[in-house]
Image: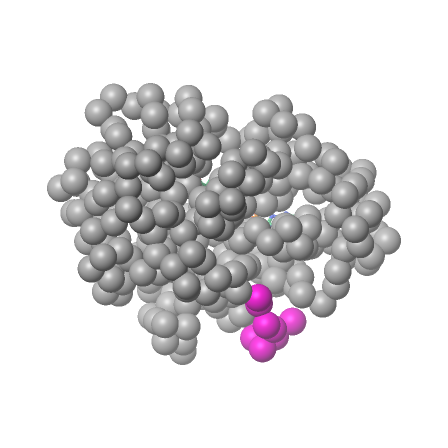
Amino acid sequence: MTETTQVPTITLNDGRAIPQLGFGVFQVPPEDTAETTGLALDVGYRHIDTAQGYGNEQGVGDAVRDSSLGRDAVWITSKLTNSMTTSDEIRTSFEETLRKLGSDYVDLFLIHWPLPKREGSDFVARWKVLEEFHADGRARSIGVSNFEVEHLQRLAAECDVVPAVNQIEIHPYLLNEEVRTFGEAQGIATEAWSPIAQGEVLSDPVITEIAERVERTAAQVVLRWHVQRNSIVFPKSVTPERIRENFELFDFELSDDDMEAITSLDKGEAGRTGPNPNEFTG
Ligand SMILES: NC(=O)c1ccc[n+]([C@@H]2O[C@H](COP(=O)([O-])OP(=O)(O)OC[C@H]3O[C@@H](n4cnc5c(N)ncnc54)[C@H](OP(=O)(O)O)[C@@H]3O)[C@@H](O)[C@H]2O)c1
């Protein structure tokens, strides 16, 4: 596939259009991030998902700056790290994010985890600081990550801005359907993190059978399933062939039966690979 491949966009509740397919850089070593992200940009990705906690925002900023693309051609998401709790810490760390990205704005800034059990950490108070960044235009969109229904309900009751997205763990073994449905009813778009469960779902016989039949790889089948469910995805890879492979999702379609077969692999809570957001304290 070439740079001309048209990645669909999803329109967020603030009217901004995010490319539905992006590139995730969790666990990409900081020293390799500029090169790996540069390759993703060459392949055609125009949406990069990083975080303060990944330690590689600088590499993302360098890659965008070193590319022939203008800053406005690439959607960059970053996330507030868990240790930032006071308003001053949050403001200072956000300025640091912009400095590392080499930009006077970020496209989307998220609260990384709600941390309901962490002492002295109130996600409503943190959200109000993100609302400041949104109001002054330095965070063009703001959203949350790993928020459960009750956390979204508190934001709705106590805050002004509805999150543009909720970035949550979703893959065939964990549908996370209650959170997804509740958020979408409020106009919150769903971003699916670990979309291939870090590779865990790729050897599932249901998925490998479909992949063989439609002559695609297992990763492409699972990523296409996300696309057809209207989720925003950003698979991570440091392997050039996989970075290309994961971008080739828009010239085939899964049938309703294949979509359902993948959806039926859900294991509920047992399928979760990351921490439970209600328990996680950072
Ligand atoms: N908000 C949150 O709390 C949160 C949590 C986790 C992730 N995320 C975001 O979601 C992004 C994606 O999630 P993730 O990195 O956890 O996992 P993922 O994208 O589901 O899987 C990445 C793993 O799968 C391998 N892989 C990638 N493409 C492949 C392919 N075509 N065939 C076979 N293996 C393949 C990669 O290996 P190689 O790299 O060795 O090629 C890597 O080990 C992250 O980078 C991050 O941006 C957010």
The tally of labels here is 0
Q: Nearer the viewer, residue 232 or 222?
A: 232
Residue 31 in view, yes or no: no
193 is higher (above) or lower (below) than 61: above
Residue 38 is situated, as x and y percent measured from the top left of the image, at 45, 66
| SS majority, magenta | loop
In x, y percent, where is residue 219? 68, 50
In the rendered image, residue 218, in percent from the top left (x then y), is placed at 73, 49
Residue at 47 percent across and 27 percent down: it is: 275
Can the viewer see residue 8? yes
Who is closer to the viewer here, 46 or 181? Answer: 181
Quadrant in which residue 244 is drawn: bottom right
* Image location of residue 85, percent across then percent down: 22, 34
Residue at 41 percent of width and 63 percent of height: 15
From the viewer's perspective, is 66 left or right of 231? left
Depicted 36 relative to depicted 112: above or below:
below
Name the outermost residue toward the front: 157
Q: Residue at x 38, y 43 (%)?
A: 144
Residue 112 counted in the magenta span = no
Q: Going by the picture, which residue comes out furthest to the left?
A: 88
Picture quadrant of residue 68? bottom left
State the quadrant of the N terminus: bottom right
Q: Where does the magenta region start and end?
A: 1-8
Residue at 25% x, 39% y is 126
